[in-house]
Amino acid sequence: MSFNTFGHLFRVTTFGESHGPAIGCVVDGCPPRIPLTEADIQPYLDRRRPGQSRYTTQRQEPDAVRILSGVFVDEVTGQQVTTGTPIALVIDNVDQRSRDYSDIKDKYRPGHADYTYDVKYGLRDYRGGGRQSARETAMRVAAGAIARKILPDFNVRGALVQMGPHRVDRARWDWAEVGRNPFFCPDAKLAAVLGDYLDGLRKRGSSIGAVIEVVAEGVPPGLGAPVYGKLDADLAGALMSINAVKGAEAGAEMRMGNDGKPLFLSNNAGGILGGISTGQPVVARFAVKPTSSILIPRRTVDRFGHETEISTTGRHDPCVGIRAVPIGEAMVACVIADHYLRQRGQVGETPAWPLTQSAR
Amino acid sequence: MSFNTFGHLFRVTTFGESHGPAIGCVVDGCPPRIPLTEADIQPYLDRRRPGQSRYTTQRQEPDAVRILSGVFVDEVTGQQVTTGTPIALVIDNVDQRSRDYSDIKDKYRPGHADYTYDVKYGLRDYRGGGRQSARETAMRVAAGAIARKILPDFNVRGALVQMGPHRVDRARWDWAEVGRNPFFCPDAKLAAVLGDYLDGLRKRGSSIGAVIEVVAEGVPPGLGAPVYGKLDADLAGALMSINAVKGAEAGAEMRMGNDGKPLFLSNNAGGILGGISTGQPVVARFAVKPTSSILIPRRTVDRFGHETEISTTGRHDPCVGIRAVPIGEAMVACVIADHYLRQRGQVGETPAWPLTQSAR
Amino acid sequence: MSFNTFGHLFRVTTFGESHGPAIGCVVDGCPPRIPLTEADIQPYLDRRRPGQSRYTTQRQEPDAVRILSGVFVDEVTGQQVTTGTPIALVIDNVDQRSRDYSDIKDKYRPGHADYTYDVKYGLRDYRGGGRQSARETAMRVAAGAIARKILPDFNVRGALVQMGPHRVDRARWDWAEVGRNPFFCPDAKLAAVLGDYLDGLRKRGSSIGAVIEVVAEGVPPGLGAPVYGKLDADLAGALMSINAVKGAEAGAEMRMGNDGKPLFLSNNAGGILGGISTGQPVVARFAVKPTSSILIPRRTVDRFGHETEISTTGRHDPCVGIRAVPIGEAMVACVIADHYLRQRGQVGETPAWPLTQSAR
Amino acid sequence: MSFNTFGHLFRVTTFGESHGPAIGCVVDGCPPRIPLTEADIQPYLDRRRPGQSRYTTQRQEPDAVRILSGVFVDEVTGQQVTTGTPIALVIDNVDQRSRDYSDIKDKYRPGHADYTYDVKYGLRDYRGGGRQSARETAMRVAAGAIARKILPDFNVRGALVQMGPHRVDRARWDWAEVGRNPFFCPDAKLAAVLGDYLDGLRKRGSSIGAVIEVVAEGVPPGLGAPVYGKLDADLAGALMSINAVKGAEAGAEMRMGNDGKPLFLSNNAGGILGGISTGQPVVARFAVKPTSSILIPRRTVDRFGHETEISTTGRHDPCVGIRAVPIGEAMVACVIADHYLRQRGQVGETPAWPLTQSAR
């Protein structure tokens, strides 16, 4: 029911704005006795953190996560484990530069949610995007780090497969490459040209969209449901909740894109059939639109209804899709962990299928 | 939490298989005092019903809906209105032809959910698709007919905008055309060629995908939420829960498709900004994949793990996307009605925006 | 979120008024492969059905339940089993005597919800109690019959332990007696006097409250949760949702009542400690207030705000608590089944406790 | 679905243990533009805080609440108001005395949840009650302070009406007295004797139960629902989720207790009829059992299954019911605020009832 929670048995509630004291989340429903410390979460946050290369926004936040609850040191093993109670995570906001918001506090930036916030709530926190700040996604990544530990042999990896007109050549796909370039690109040859491409965009004050692909291995068969809890629909919905994502799909064929066939008209399974996982790797894909911040002055209105002009300055990210890779991984991990617990609740741990034959 | 419910304040729970006694739904949370009889619902069901043209499956079901609860005749006006309590709707299944399922009851049809059902539940109702039967969508259409009555001046219309390689020319768009051809096509010239195109597909035992567009007018500004209740993400998720839908988007620019630009990389609003409605018409679009039933024998396995061959016979629909138009309309209507009630709950009826100025 | 659903993983949504075509419910989340036919449900409905003795209301309804969905005949065993999809149940309303409602349709009966319905919804279905009709509880009983089948070795039994000033003597408690008298009374000696007691009340047009006790055996340890999902609080909440129930408790000591000690100040466990089941039988108790229908004319107002007088006639039940016994059993069964699935989802099937020692 | 959330539109998720770094909560769904600072919350926390008199536990925690998100300073008024996004509150745990838990870490204290935690989760945080620590209730009080601001003219007040055998005389009820004695007792004469009574109990290492009454004024008519969302059942369920509460009721007659009539068999309204508020003050009542900590050595088992002895030492509260008064107020405020938003969502702001007449 909440506008700030996702998941059902593995539930994540996030809170916080970029200019308040902190952002955070509560992960509820995590099974007990799972080893968990900050060190399990921090590396994923570090991958998402801006300012790591000149291709992403230069905001500098250490993004150091703290676990406030839900863990306990097992006295025998000495290991810190989950207790089954809510795990609260917080990250303090430390980079709250005093900035002049006098231009945007009254004016509506085209393509931003300034107007819709005002019309919905009667006010808006104009500092750094308010609730819709990209910082919120840090908590998804943190929750995803916990979700990754729930299924045995669970491995969730993402990669950038397209940036503007540039697509990976799947014949050159190498997961090891993803960590070697600042674009999360699995195709070394493509990665070599993306830097120059982005530099050109930035010089023009322009920006570009991207397509991200996430592959989850170790997903048991039977997750999802026939009608409203389809695994592919839930994955797509979770991915579309990420800022700037305008389309998503899951369960489609794995190899496509270079052959010119339309994205949605294919027919292969990709780990999901009829909304239910097959036991094969689950593949999800989503498209991130270009940022709407551009430097050119544009006509707009202010909140008093007067016509005016606005030009956006400040931090500028020519391809926000790059940083969406760890976020997409996290959302896929959370959705699958949730479905895993739901399936275990309704049907139990005993696999249904091998029993069918002997039972009959 | 349920796998068979959608919505939060306007909640729809569907039930039923195509070969049980009936299908139905419970609509909970509908405001009271809304005029409602079967005659408000039946026309939408009639539009969805198969067997109305030679281009859709020939299954013959009257699909006559009955209201079991939640309405009452106002003694003064003599009008039947909602009471605010759950509205249960049922449609009896009357076309239960005795059919021979001996071939498919043990064999897994490629591209179907046969295997995943067995592996999830340990059994499957192989008759007519079981729970995943297209008949389930009739209840979405019925619920949508109620949702349409919740907002004042609410108008939700859909159209087929692409079938295989054939796209509508938006310069020829005429809503009145949609009701004049069996394809829900707003472009009369395109509609004129689709019949022959489909006949050709059927002769070859082939099938084709389609893209549907739904436009909702009368949507007040302020619906949706910044993070997990984004109106566009919720619309896309609802559309992706429809059988055979493999991709969906909402809130993107209205005119596209003929210009060759990629679907997801556009930047216009289409009625939604930052996940929140702007007050302009809301546009949603979804793609329906071709049916997986084909007549050519294919290799598969049976539920005992033995390799075998299968060829699907029976009713065949060369483009299931056609019938998805009224279903898509219904899902859009339900999602927006739900967000309307949620916004009214949290923020109240008084528009937030015009107050801002005077309040300050 | 719904006002007409209870449970989380084992979810029951009820619908219907006593004077519409039918009442019904949808049970969602039931595990698959559980044998289920109407014959598993009907006996519980028959126990609840009014008109079975002269001590309960004489409304005559066969209350024949039909399963509309969610079951399938296993082809090998020939047994009808659940499929894991929603189970819809309906009971047609057949005893819709044409009755004159002219007196009560405008007047507010004291102690009834007539006024609050009007003030909430702007109208009310005055026929037979509308949504709040006792008939709604038939669907709880039906859902409870399914819940009983979810846990192995699950046995849920209820008994009337107090009627007005008359309390059972626990030394004479005999479960076999419960089925032998029309009061569900486990104390044969007490049962022998209750008939005369009720006859006296009825002659005076009076009515009396009762206390019901439900004992659930076969409840595994570990169900419930520390804070908001306490098993005792959930049981009490479920019991208090029954019409005319004004107080409930669970997990308190089993033997009390005859010793004069206050109900709530005791300290024994009764199967629940800290909100979590211990593995011992779970005991719940609830009090049903006297019916508010009395024959003496009383002052009231009508819906136009005019003062007037009203006297209630018609069917009269001197102790509605009697018929609450099977309803209380059903609610206890549903709550425990739901917690069983939730615990299995979060923690899994392997018992946590015997592992603790070896794991360390 | 969560075990750590309550409410639907006004949703409160709490987290934290007494011996972790902090406790906290997230309040989601709060309407925007409500003035809110820490100063609105802190006074309620101060009333609940232990160690304020010699009659409650001596644990010393400043319980200083911090708002981490969901507020914004309105630039025109200069006032800090809610934004409609999640409000996160935290209280650091500062009184984490290093204590020796060697005795209780392996032994199960009779009457405590030690065993049930181990059997549920496979481990337990034995420090200070873990998740079930009374500290968790501080966050309920904090959330309640926000809930109090949602309805206009909303006033929620509680009082201790019974301690062991001592009951208030309602003829002497004076709300002003509640703040003048350390027992929240509205009867000055009774308050004068409770101190000595508690001193006697403490000397004997004994403890006693209490009954608390909460009265909510300014509750509009129409809140609640006929079947599963009954306002009285929801209030009772919320109150029963408080630690050590073993029974609760709402909506019963206001004056009782001194007349010897059984609690549950009364028939008056107390602000709720048929589960729906009447517009009159809503009255709820709950009973808190004596603490189970006693100093006398008792037989028990340890987690390895060996028989042993245990005697509880440390902080001892002879009547935990005293501190339950502000907690009960908070739960009542939260439940009513939630129902207020839900009613506004389904039915709208326009009162339904005065319209009935003119509409007809």
Image (spheres, coloured by chain):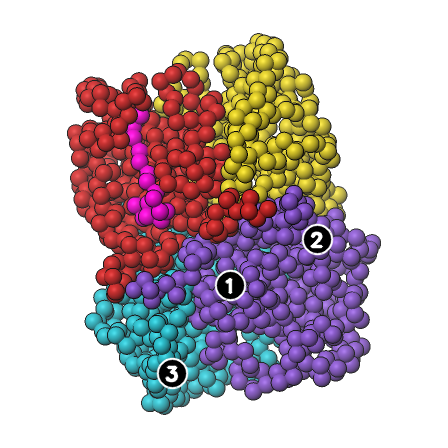
Chain colours: A yellow, B red, C cyan, D purple
Marks 1/3 same chain: no
Q: Quadrant of residue B328?
A: top left
Tell me the number on the disc at residue C299.
Answer: 3
Q: Secondary structure at mark 2?
A: helix
Q: Is residue B163 magenta?
A: yes
Quadrant for the C terminus of chain D in the image: bottom left
Q: Name the residue located 33 percent from the left edge and 38 percent from the top edge.
A: B156
Disc 2 + disc 3, Cβ < 8 Å: no
Q: Secondary structure at mark 1?
A: helix
Lower position in the chain sequence, tag 1 or tag 2: 2
- Mark 2 — residue? D38
Query: Residue D287's x, y, as percent?
Result: 61, 72
Chain ID, mark 1: D
Front label number (1 vs 2): 2
Tell me the number on the disc at residue A198.
Answer: none
Q: Name the residue located 50 percent from the left edge and 74 percent from the top edge.
A: D270
Q: Name the residue located 33 percent from the left edge and 57 percent from the top edge.
A: B33
Front label number (1 vs 3): 3
Q: Which residues are magenta?
A: B145-164
Q: Is residue C305 left or right of residue D160?
A: left
Number of numbered discs present? 3
> Badge 2, how many Cα within 10 Å: few under 14, some, many 20+?
some
- Mark 1 — residue? D234
* Three-letter code, disc 1: Asp
Query: Residue D112's x, y, as percent?
Result: 67, 64
